[in-house]
Image (cartoon, grey):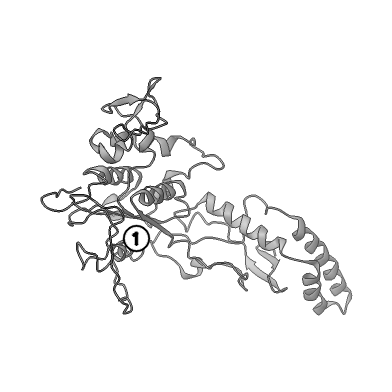
Amino acid sequence: DSHVHERVGSRGRLITTPNTTPNTASSSWHYPRQQQQQQQYLSEIERMATIDRVVKRARKCCMDTQGRRIILVSLIVGLSLSFILTPQQGSSSMAGAEIFADGEEHESDLYPMIQPWPKGWLRINRTRVVVGGNSNSGDFAHQVHIAYSSMINGACLFTAQPFHCAVMRFQQDPLVDAGFFEDKDKAHNVPLCEDCPDGKTLVYDHCKNLPHVVDVGQLPDYPRRECGADGAPGCLDNTDHLRNPNQRVYLQRGTRDKCYRKGSVANVQALYAQLMDNPTEQIKFNNTLRLKHEIPAYGNADDPNYDGPTECFKHTLFHGMAMRPPTADKLRTIREQIKDGGGGGDWDDSR
């Protein structure tokens, strides 16, 4: 059957699965990078096949002439599977989850994987992959989300600065002498600056400490244009993946955070807003709590009743639906990642 593929499973059984070439009539979103990865996963499984496994399957029908022909074909298929590195272009027998035009996720599409499942492989719902972090790890999580938006559906950013912002020069940026300075009284300046004159560079962490100089209208230029209209192997994913309504971002900055200044995280919000179709639904920004530079887990010292990770999961994974209450556990002391000297008292701002 031209619509059916047979392949060898991890336990020596032939497995029949439908050819799930994307149907443009029923699906609104298709991810080329995911399809490429699915083909790579399939080739890994095919390489695990051995001739004797195919023979075991073929022995069941070896008593007649037709059966002997099946054995011969099975041997040829087994040899082919052992040496094929990639499946044919344009077809894949493993499909990732799709968001359909009606906005519903069909259960059969969440895990259209092989049976039996290969030993040691993780069973992952590809529509529920979220990255997260705080401070420099928040920067990194944000970068990963933008770069791999075909595979990642959300981000929990407890302070972050905009993608590629650190090396971008804006009109209001003050310029300083290029080079590293180890003297404690001098700045550690940015070693790479786009569009800076020779011998000059940007102030280190200008997007965190001087967020007012950032021209948010320039921020989408790099992720949209760096890899060209059609993309390139090993380059950033197409930003159109962020238009998927399943994409969600949770942002937070405490009003007593002196590491990421007022406006820094708001600039991340502005970047996402320009890349998403419905930013008011897809982005949630909490910037009103008197928190310091921290991930405010339940029981934190500044606002014990606020659980930041849970709030993020409500937005990114459950889309506002109710969550099961957590199981009882002993509370642990939650401390700031970086001490904000003088972070209390009258110091308080928002955004």
Query: Quick one: which residue is furthest to the top in this view?
Result: 198
Q: Is residue 177 above or below residue 120?
A: above
Q: Which residue is mark 1?
A: 316
Quarter-of-image position of residue 190: top left
Q: Is residue 351 above or below residue 9?
A: above
> Which quadrant of the rendered structure holds the N terminus?
bottom right
Q: Is residue 303 left or right of residue 196?
A: left
Q: Residue at x 36, y 55 (%)?
A: 133
Quarter-of-image position of residue 13: bottom right
Q: Residue at x 28, y 28 (%)?
A: 173
Q: Nearer the viewer, residue 269 or 90?
A: 269
Q: Is residue 80 left or right of residue 11?
A: right
Q: Is residue 137 above or below residue 321?
A: above
Q: Nearer the viewer, residue 61 or 240?
A: 240
Q: Is residue 112 above or below residue 263?
A: below
Query: Quick one: which residue is furthest to the right in this view?
Result: 65
Q: Residue at x 10, y 50 (%)?
A: 346
Image location of residue 194, percent across then percent down = 40, 28
Q: Residue at x 28, y 55 (%)?
A: 281
Image location of residue 275, percent across then percent down = 35, 44
How many labels were placed on the picture?
1
Q: Using the rendered image of the protein, determine whether residue 243 is visible from the camera's viewpoint.
A: no
Which secondary structure, mark 1?
A: helix
Image location of residue 266, percent across then percent down = 25, 45
Q: Is residue 99 left or right of residue 322?
A: right
Q: Is residue 12 left or right of residue 166?
A: right
